[in-house]
Image (cartoon, helix red, strand yellow):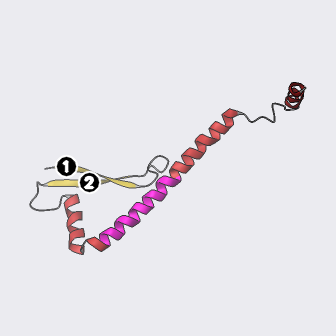
Amino acid sequence: QARQAFSQDLSNVTTSQAPSPQPAEFDNDINKVKTHKQLSRRMSVKFHEWHQNWSENHLSPQQYEFANEWMMGNLSDYKVNHTSILTDNPLDKPPYRVYNRFRVEYK
């Protein structure tokens, strides 16, 4: 009797009521992409704020300027070079923000 009641309960369930696994997986993949994008942006902002705060509290203006001059290769006691800044803007793929790459050409 319990088996008959169970099968009668199942006979009332139509396929339209049962969720399809494919759309749920598809929605989950979309949510993962959205979440990853939001997380990447949030962590980028958080790191930028931390770095700026750390720089202001631990570097003098002269040290900050020296680091920038060193990064650009503008120091006289180093090998002569030219540093180009290449700005990438891939907002549709990681890291979902504008960033700079540096190319050094030695002369």
Q: Position of residue 86 (x, y in %)?
A: 32, 52
Magenta residues, start to end: 38-56
Read off the residue under disc 1: 105
Left or right for 24, reference 68: right
Q: Which mark is residue 84?
A: 2
Question: CA gap, disc 2 to disc 1?
Answer: 8 Å
Left or right for 32, reference 97: right
Mark toward the start of the polypeptide (2 vs 1): 2
Is 5 placed above or below 24 here?
Answer: above
The answer to which quarter of the image holds residue 2 is top right
State whether the magenta stretch is mostly helix, strand or loop.
helix
Q: Nearer the viewer, residue 26 or 13?
A: 13
User: Residue at (16%, 53%) from the top-left corner?
Assistant: 81
Q: Position of residue 42 (x, y in %)?
A: 48, 58
Amino acid carrying mark 1 in the image: Glu
User: Residue at (39%, 63%) from the top-left corner?
Assistant: 48
Q: Nearer the viewer, residue 87 or 49?
A: 49
Is 16 placed above or below 44 here?
Answer: above
User: Residue at (48%, 56%) from the top-left corner?
Assistant: 41
Q: Secondary structure at mark 2?
A: strand
Q: Secondary structure at mark 1?
A: strand
